[in-house]
Image (tube, rainbow, N blue to C red):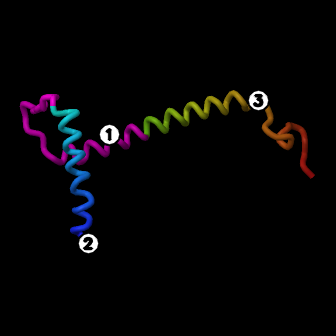
């Protein structure tokens, strides 16, 4: 079964590698190095923390926007049963 998968995916992988080299091969590789050593756990912990903070910030902004939209519509009743002074029987 593994030979079949390799036979099917092998040419696709080679074609994608050729395409990537053709399209991006002219761009020089950028080597980024810091003047100090950064432990691996910083990236393992830092990336999820940044994602959680971005989700929190986005959700908080959406909640504030929704709260302000609801504040505008508080003066008008949303359904006939919500009218003040009317009792349901």
Residue farthest to the right?
A: 89
Q: Quadrant of residue 43?
A: top left
Secondary structure of the residue carrying tag 3 is helix
Residue 78, image x and y in percent? 78, 37
Give the residue at x 25% y 47%: 45
Judging depth in this view, the residue of 29 and 37 nearest the camera is 29
Relative to 26, 78 lies left or right: right
Label 3: few (<14), some (14–19) or many (≥20) C-alpha neighbours in 10 Å? few
Say whether disc 3 or disc 1 marks the residue closer to the N-terminus: 1
Label 1: few (<14), some (14–19) or many (≥20) C-alpha neighbours in 10 Å? few
Give the total of numbered labels. Answer: 3
Q: Look at the numbered discs 2 and 3 and tell me whether their residues touch, using CB distance below 8 Å.
A: no
Secondary structure of the residue carrying tag 1 is helix
Q: Is residue 24 magenta?
A: no
Say whether disc 1 or disc 2 marks the residue closer to the N-terminus: 2
Relative to 46, 26 lies left or right: left
Pointer 2 residue: 1
Q: Quadrant of residue 70?
A: top right
Residue 44, image x and y in percent? 23, 48
Give the residue at x 26% y 72%: 1
Give the spatial CA distance, label 1 vs label 2. 41 Å
Q: Look at the numbered discs 1 and 2 and tell me whether their residues touch, using CB distance below 8 Å.
A: no
Above or below, 13 against 78 in this view is below
Say whether disc 2 or disc 3 marks the residue closer to the N-terminus: 2
Of the two numbered discs 2 and 3 in the rendering, the one whose residue sits closer to the viewer: 2
Q: Look at the numbered discs 3 and 1 and tell me whether their residues touch, using CB distance below 8 Å.
A: no
Q: Is residue 50 magenta?
A: yes
Pointer 3 residue: 75
Above or below, 82 against 69 in this view is below
Provide the residue span drawn in magenta: 26-55
Q: Which mark is residue 50?
A: 1
Give the spatial CA distance, label 2 vs label 3. 67 Å
């Amino acid at each position: 079964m593994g030979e079949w998968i390799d036979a099917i995916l092998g040419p696709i992988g080679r074609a994608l590698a050729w395409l990537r080299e053709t399209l991006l091969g002219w761009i020089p590789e950028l080597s980024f190095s810091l003047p100090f050593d950064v432990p691996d756990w910083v990236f393992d912990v830092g990336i999820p923390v940044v994602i959680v903070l971005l989700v929190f910030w986005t959700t908080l902004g959406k909640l504030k926007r929704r709260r302000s939209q609801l504040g505008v519509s508080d003066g008008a009743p949303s359904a006939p049963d919500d009218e003040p002074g009317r009792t349901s029987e």
